[in-house]
Image (cartoon, rainbow, N blue to C red):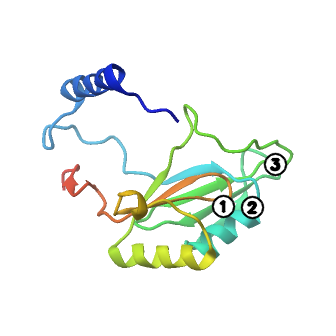
Amino acid sequence: MPQPQGVELDAVRGRRAALKEQYLRKRGDRPATPTRGVHHVAFIAKDVEETIRFWQETLGFPLVELVENRDYAGSSHFLFDIGHHNLLGFFDFPGHDHPEFHETIGGLQHLALSVSAEQFAAARAKLDAAGIEYLGPDRGVDDSLYIRDPNGLGIEFYREELGLFDGEPLLDD
């Protein structure tokens, strides 16, 4: 996608600086968040078995539930353990047309998963062994590997502690 340049880039950067100044509160000055955290995020799967094989067999995330969707007869709702008591869910909708993935407003750009240095190396080795293409250290982003699952879902393996971004703590303890 084309990136802004020149005057347009300066305007975008100026707008971001103004938003940061207006809305970003310093750690310790922020109110408590109103929830306990993410229970699960749910995405749409084109194929249940292909999605299970990819997430569990290829990436190593255990499937922890597979039930009928309570809101749509015949649809499956299935969940994977992605660590730290967080779940990743999928639904399928038999009979629905599923267009190819594309980035759009309201769509997911990617899901960043925190990994240790050892987990990062293991993920990279698994991807290499499976012949799965990724973007990552080769483009100057040393701590990230980016892939897409069979549904087009963007996944980042991010070698960073939870609550940190580029080594900087974002959250109060």
Task: From the image, tell me which residue sits under label 1.
Answer: 78
Q: Residues within 10 Å of mark 3 (few under 14, many from 20)?
A: few
> Disc 3 marks which amino acid?
Ala
> Disc 1 marks which amino acid?
Phe
CA distance separating discs 1 and 2: 8 Å
- Foreground residue among 164 and 122: 122
Q: Residue 123: which disc?
A: none
Give the left or right position of residue 74, taking residue 145 as reference. Answer: right
Which mark is first along the chain, 3 or 2?
Answer: 2
State which mark lies toward you, 1 or 2.
Answer: 2
Check whether the beta carbons of the residues at disc 1 and disc 2 lie within 8 A of each other. yes
Which mark is first along the chain, 1 or 3?
Answer: 3
Q: Residue at x 65, y 68 (%)?
A: 54
Q: Residue at x 28, y 27 (%)?
A: 13
Task: From the image, tell me which residue sits under label 3.
Answer: 73
Question: Dividing the picture into quarters, in which one does residue 51 lie?
Answer: bottom right
Task: From the image, tell me which residue sits under label 2.
Answer: 48
Q: Position of residue 74 (x, y in %)?
A: 82, 52
Question: Dividing the picture into quarters, in which one does residue 101 lie?
Answer: top right
Q: Position of residue 31 (x, y in %)?
A: 22, 37
> Disc 2 marks which amino acid?
Val
Give the left or right position of residue 141, taking residue 125 as reference. Answer: left
Farthest residue, direction right: 95
Residue 60 in view in this figure = no
Q: Residues within 10 Å of mark 2 (few under 14, many from 20)?
A: some
Q: Position of residue 3 (x, y in %)?
A: 44, 32
Q: Position of residue 142 (x, y in %)?
A: 34, 63
Which mark is first along the chain, 2 or 1?
Answer: 2
